[in-house]
Amino acid sequence: MTATLTKLSPQAVRTRLAEGRAVLVDIRESDEFARIHIAGAQSQPLSGWEQAHLTVDPAADVIFTCRTGMRTGGACDRLAARVAGEAFVLDGGLDGWAQAGLPLVQDKAAPMELQRQVQITAGLLILTGVVLGFLVHPGWFGLAGFVGAGLTFAGLTGTCGIARLLLLAPWNRARPA
């Protein structure tokens, strides 16, 4: 049996939250949540979903959200299984909420999401290898190949060397409270 999540418009979600009838559960990673989220949302990253303890009033509607709705759609079985009654999803996710002109809590001092940092770094390394391969020496093409192999390894194993290195960067270290 495939579970489904009933889509709710951003306005319907806002109404349910304002009336105290719903709990919004954000399944994005904690670094994404720290940068931008909907006020009052609970952070429950999908990566730790099986270990997480979802504490929600059984009478409340549980509404899940992510950035665009893709993660919630892809994990609807896992998400709906944790809810006693009907489960809901914010249509369009955080992006849909923003497009509807609804307020967001933003911390511009929080670092950019780690996944985006990895994408930017890998892209720049590959581009550098290709440009230097054409302009300086063909040996530089090896840099692009090395990064490509690293990304393949990361996809197969779930271990990303670039992400591990970026976590050591000063801007990604935990700030004192």
Image: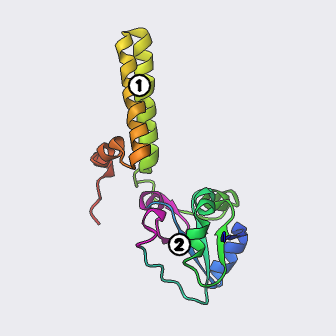
Q: Would you name the residue on which mark 1 appears?
A: 144
Q: In which quarter of the image is residue 133?
A: top left
Please provide the residue range marked out in magenta: 30-51
Q: Would you name the residue on which mark 2 appears?
A: 41
Element type at mark 1: helix
Tell me which residue sits at (43%, 30%) in the image.
124
Decide: is 11 above or below 174: below
Question: Is residue 106 visible to the viewer in this orientation of the structure?
Answer: no
Q: Is 91 displayed left or right of 36 in the figure?
A: right
Q: Is 71 displayed left or right of 52 in the figure?
A: right
| Image location of residue 147, percent across then percent down | 39, 31
Q: Looking at the picture, which amino acid does disc 1 mark?
A: Ala
Q: Which of marks 2 and 1 is in front?
A: 1
| Image location of residue 168, percent across then percent down | 27, 47
Question: Considering only order in the chain, which callout, 1 or 2, is on the residue closer to the N terminus?
Answer: 2
Question: Is residue 148 visible to the viewer in this orientation of the structure?
Answer: yes
Tell me which residue sits at (45%, 60%) in the image.
29
Decide: is 146 above or below 70: above
**Crowding near pointer 1: few (<14 within 10 Å), some, many (20+)?**
many
Residue 4 is marked as none
The quarter of the picture where the N terminus appears is bottom right
Q: Looking at the picture, which amino acid does disc 2 mark?
A: Ala
Element type at mark 2: loop
Magenta span includes 174: no
Magenta span includes 43: yes
The quarter of the picture where the C terminus appears is bottom left
Q: Toward the viewer: 73 or 9?
A: 73
